[in-house]
Amino acid sequence: MKRIITFGTFDVLHVGHIRILQRARLLGNHLTVGISTDALNWSKKQKKTVYSQFDRLEIVKAVAGVDEVFFEHSLEEKGEYIKQHAADVLVMGDDWAGKFDEFKSLCEVVYLPRTEGISTTQLLAEIRAIAS
């Protein structure tokens, strides 16, 4: 069995999220997704999520092809998460290209292209503009 792991915030789930999860799943037989906790998201981006970490975990768990979901509490633990989940491949969006190459000694690292024309930041800005 080939095990895939990916990580993200997955706030305001959109087609870009779905597509990267689908493409990641095609690389193996089992897809594990690490969801950034609210605290980790704040420390990375200084932004509060729209949905709580518990809601985001439940939403991603319901996506077809996702086999397992857990909370990512620390960026520094990524290597440990890869080991704990016996991942063969780490998949990340290509906006992170090169940033996770340090894990190539633990597993294959693949950067997938983002879906053109959509991002959570952009989507939230459009929603806020409409609401104003």
Image (tube, grey):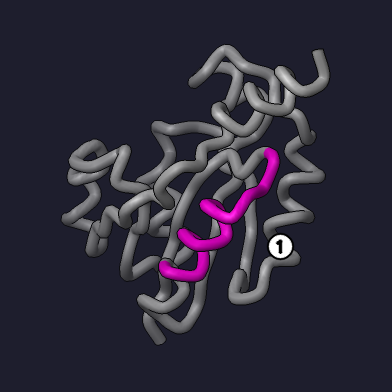
Task: Give above or below for 19 relative to 123.
Answer: below
99 or 120, nearer to the observer: 120
Residue 16 lies in the magenta-colored region? yes
Callout 1, which amino acid?
Lys
68 or 105, nearer to the observer: 68
Q: Residue at x 43, y 51 (%)?
A: 115
Q: Residue at x 80, y 12 (%)?
A: 132
Q: Residues within 10 Å of mark 1 (few under 14, many from 20)?
A: some
Task: Give above or below for 70 relative to 63.
Answer: above
Task: Give above or below for 24 relative to 42.
Answer: below
Left or right of 59: which side holds 64?
A: left
Identify residue for label 1: 61
Q: Residue at x 68, y 57 (%)?
A: 60
- The count of marks equals 1
x and y, in percent, of residue 44 in the image: 49, 21
Left or right of 113: which side holds 7?
A: right
What SS does tag 1 mark? helix
x and y, in percent, of residue 42 in the image: 60, 18
Q: Residue furthest bottom?
A: 1
Q: Main secondary structure of the magenta part?
A: helix
x and y, in percent, of residue 111 in the image: 28, 53
Residue 64 lies in the magenta-colored region? no
x and y, in percent, of residue 75 in the image: 43, 33
- The range drawn in magenta is 12-23
Q: Residue at x 25, y 62 (%)?
A: 107
Left or right of 66: which side holds 23?
A: left
Q: Quadrant of the N terminus?
A: bottom left
